[in-house]
Structures are given as structure tokens and as C-alpha cells.
Amino acid sequence: DAKTTQPNSMESNEEEPVHLPCNHSTISGTDYIHWYRQLPSQGPEYVIHGLTSNVNNRMASLAIAEDRKSSTLILHRATLRDAAVYYCILFRNSGNTPLVFGKGTRLSVIA
Amino acid sequence: DTEVTQTPKHLVMGMTNKKSLKCEQHMGHRAMYWYKQKAKKPPELMFVYSYEKLSINESVPSRFSPECPNSSLLNLHLHALQPEDSALYLCASSQEQDRSFNSPLHFGNGTRLTVT
């Protein structure tokens, strides 16, 4: 399975944008890039996913590099509630392999 | 609040006890999952049910026994557990398209299990 590499931790100031990077140099053409986050004492929560084009939703934006070997999750204005572990996961379309989590990035937001 | 409900929220059990964890969803999802999460680690996949049939068992010890009585319910029966089985047990569900697991997962908030 293709792997992802994320920084262990990042810090952001409240109300500033946050760019969370993810490297996936062995990504295959059928792999979707999914992002989940896990707030303290909660289960993981789906954030966004994409294949080739950049994606936006109410929670975040996903910027995918042209060669698809990296991607960036963008939180436009971090709030204290965004402090969580963010997981970047490759999810193979048409495969029989369900979601497998990597180590993720622990995001701290400073007031 | 999540759309996947797990009960109980907390459970303490001895090594000789038998207990069950329950998970319920009413989103019409046909794939359901059990994950185990140790402190400060990512969730690890245990089991996957697809259309009420066990589809994936990630070499989980037999002291964990899953059951899917219908499309809305998922149980995890526990027997003769060890203290190292203490963890957060997470249930999730997803729609299934073309028998592949590529739809976003909806997670419950888990059952925190302590084995004494």
C-alpha cells in the first residue's frame, strides 16, 4: 500500500491560515487522498478528499500537487476547536482495502 | 454528536468476564468497521463487515468476536481479555459502492475499555 508522510506536530495562531502538508510519493493513479481529523476524546471525523483537482468544502480546502506526490490541507482560519490530530490517508478506488491510518500531524492552536 | 452511536462509553472488565460493545447507525450504510486505538496512536483496523458478512479480519485474536445482526447494528463480543487489550474501540460505517470501501467513514466516539 502507498504510504504517506506527515510532520509529527505543527502549531498555529488562532484566526490564521494553517497549511498541513502530506507527502505520498508512491501514490498510484487510482488512489484518492483523504483527510480525517480526530479531536480530543472523539472518534475520527472525515474532512475532505480528492483525486487530482483541488477541492473545497465548508471545513477546509485540499490542494493537490500536479504530480500528485504531495498534498496540503488548508484550514483558512484556525480556531481553538481545530486543535486535533490530522490524518492524510490514501484510499484506493475499486480496491478492497479499507481505511488504514498513518501517524498523523498533531495541530496545536494558540489563542 | 455523531450519527454512529456506541455503547457503553466506558467499560471496566476483569480478565474472566464476558462483555459486549454495541454500535448502531441509521444512515443506511452497508459497511461497518471496528477499529482499536491505543493512547497517542492512530486507529488500527480490526474487522470489516460488508452487507452483514465479515469481509476483513485483520488477524485479530479470537477473544474478540464480532457480530453484525442486521445492517444497522454491529457488536463486538469480548471474552478472556488481557490488560493490554485496554484501549478505545471505535466503530465506523460507510456507504459501499461497487463492493469497494472508498466512501468516507463516519465514526462513533468509541468505547473506552479497561481490562483489570
Image (spheres, coloured by chain):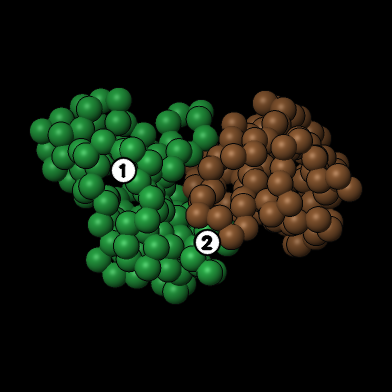
Chain colours: A brown, B green
Q: Chain of mark 1?
A: B
Residue A62 x, y percent position in the rendering: 79, 52
Residue B100's label in the rendered image is: 2
Badge 2, how many Cα within 10 Å: few under 14, some, many 20+? some
Residue A100's label in the rendered image is: none
- The number of numbered badges drawn on the structure is 2
Residue at the left extreme?
A: B16
Q: Amino acid at mark 1?
A: His
Q: Quadrant of the C terminus of chain B?
A: top left
* A65 or A57, nearer to the observer: A65
Residue B6 x, y percent position in the rendering: 36, 55
SS label for mark 2: loop
Q: Chain of mark 2?
A: B
Residue B10's label in the rendered image is: 1
Query: Would you place residue A104 above or below residue A100 in this image?
Result: above
Badge 1, how many Cα within 10 Å: few under 14, some, many 20+? few
Task: Answer whether residue A82 is visible to the viewer in this image.
Answer: no
Viewed as shown, does residue B83 lie left or right of B9? left
> What residue is shown at x 84% (from left), y 58% (from top)?
A53
Residue B87 x, y percent position in the rendering: 36, 34
What's the distance in space between the residues labelled 2 and 1, CA to CA?
A: 32 Å
> What residue is shown at x 45% (from left), y 29% (from top)?
B39
Residue B52 x, y percent position in the rendering: 32, 66
Q: Quadrant of residue A60?
A: bottom right
